Image (cartoon, rainbow, N blue to C red):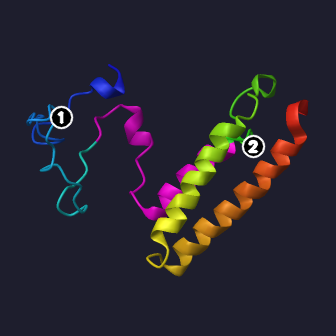
Amino acid sequence: MPFFEHPLPPGRGPPPPHTGSTGWPNTVEWCPMSEAENPQPQAETGTDEEAYPLPPASFEFLVLSMRTQAEIQLGLLHFGDPSDRPKPNLALARHSIDMLSILQEKTKGNLSLEEQRLLENSLTELRFRYVQVAEEGPQR
């Protein structure tokens, strides 16, 4: 069964959509809660989900996820055979870097020193790597 079709246990997940006058589902009552208020469901035995638990949602994980995405788009990270290495997608990488930049701009003054450094260092590194990959051009 595909992941997106996996049924949720009773009482878990968003409520059924209620359409309002706009026709869009009204899911205002579905809000993320703390771990104590909303414990994670236990994975079924014998599935891959047990071996790979999800990390807690955090600002650090968000930044690292977006950074990894940009590194993959720049062709810096590749999983698989070296001969199947995809070409860098500079437009997509630039978009991901710009998204991190917007995140930095919108969270200015609201981050811990550690979060601020992680974001600044990630952006500096990605911008530097972007220029390197762009200068290499089609040789890759």
User: Badge 1 local density, few (<14 within 10 Å), some, or many (20+)?
Assistant: few
Label 2 sits on what residue type?
A: Leu
Residue 54 falls within the magenta-colored stretch? yes
Give coordinates of residue 46: x percent, y percent.
35, 31
Residue in the picture at 20% in, 34% down: 8
Which residue was labeled with disc 1? 24
Compared across the picture, whether 3 is left or right of 12 comes to right
Compared across the picture, whether 127 is left or right of 120 comes to right
Which residue was labeled with disc 2? 76
Compared across the picture, whether 100 is left or right of 79 comes to left
Label 1 sits on what residue type?
A: Trp
Give coordinates of residue 86: x percent, y percent.
73, 28
**Secondary structure of the residue carrying numbered label 1:** loop
Residue in the picture at 16% in, 44% down: 27
Give coordinates of residue 35: x percent, y percent.
25, 61
Residue 57 falls within the magenta-colored stretch? yes
Compared across the picture, whether 91 is left or right of 56 comes to right
Mark number, residue 119: none
Q: Work out whether mark 2 precedes mark 1 in sequence or the reverse, and give the earlier one.
A: 1
**Secondary structure of the residue carrying numbered label 2:** loop
Residue 67 visible from this viewpoint: no
- Circles 2 and 1 in contact, beta carbons < 8 Å: no
Residue in the picture at 43% in, 76% down: 110
Mark closer to the observer (2, 1) = 1
Q: Quadrant of the C terminus?
A: top right
Which residues are drawn in magenta? 43-71
Residue in the picture at 16% in, 49% down: 30
User: Badge 2 local density, few (<14 within 10 Å), some, or many (20+)?
Assistant: some
Where on the picture, by quarter, is residue 85? top right
Give coordinates of residue 82: x percent, y percent.
80, 28
